[in-house]
Amino acid sequence: MNSVTAIASILLAAILTNNMVLSKFLGICPFLGVSKKTDTAVSMSIAVILVMVVATAVTWPIYTYLLYPNYTYLETIVFILVIAAIVQLIEIVLKRYIKPVYEALGIYLPLITTNCAVLGITMLNITNELSFVESLFNALGAGLGFLLAMVLFSGIREKMETADIPAFLKGLPITLVAAALVSLSFLGFAGIGA
């Protein structure tokens, strides 16, 4: 398989078949918490894409050249610290230059630090022994998959606001049912990509 095909396969698989939210169930907190409005979901997803790609660009060389092979036990703590620093930097930039996005994201922006999808993609890149370039495309694909899941689910949640839902299903129960159905719909992509 040539490198372009391999990269396309990694990207497609990260978006559809290995979707961090709908397949691996990582990043559920923002998926459920920030998906009430599409514009907020898109803003959050763009921030997550940026953090995933930048975190991968920083953590891959740290792991490869500093932690491997003697200090691999420090992987989780080092990756969390790198992700926290990147999120802080993005938060400062948004607060200073793009205040409406900063205010729309509210408490969910600092929570990207603890978004397990971000940590998950950095660790999966190492576990799957992807090269630096493959890791970057895998992170980009994971971020785009997160965006896809968020936009689809926010559209469904916006439609549910006007739906006639039985009282016993209102709130969290119908939200979880809808999330499960969206997740099931992605099973149709099984076998596509890597």
Image (cartoon, rainbow, N blue to C red):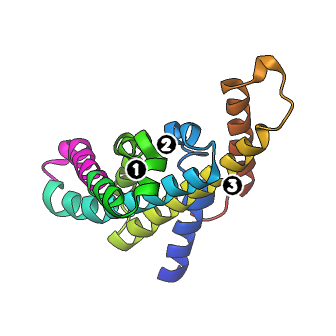
User: Which sits earlier in the primary sequence, circle 2 or circle 1?
Assistant: 2
What residue sits right under mark 1 in the picture? Answer: 118
- Kind of residue at disc 2: Gly
Compared to 58, does 5 lie above or below?
below
Residue 2 located left or right of residue 90:
right
- Magenta span has 11? no
Give the camera-side residue of 15 and 69. Answer: 15
Looking at the image, the residue that sits furthest to the right is 164
User: Which sits earlier in the primary sequence, circle 2 or circle 3?
Assistant: 2
What residue sits right under mark 3 in the picture? Answer: 190
- Residue drawn where x is 53% and y is 68% of the image: 11
Label 3: element kind: loop
The C terminus sits in image quarter? bottom right
The residues tagged by marks 2 and 1 sit, at their Cα atoms, a distance apart of: 8 Å
Start-end of magenta stretch = 69-87
Give the camera-side residue of 92 and 75. Answer: 92
- Kind of residue at disc 1: Val
Select label 2 or label 3 by which is in front: 2
Say whether marks 2 and 1 touch (CB < 8 Å).
yes
Select label 1 or label 3 by which is in front: 1
- Kind of residue at disc 3: Ala
Compared to 136, does 1 lie above or below?
below
The quarter of the picture where residue 157 lies is top right
What residue sits right under mark 2 in the picture? Answer: 27
Q: Position of residue 26 (x, y in %)?
A: 49, 42
Q: Is residue 117 visible?
A: no
Q: Is residue 113 visible?
A: yes
The residues tagged by marks 1 and 3 sit, at their Cα atoms, a distance apart of: 23 Å
Label 1: element kind: helix
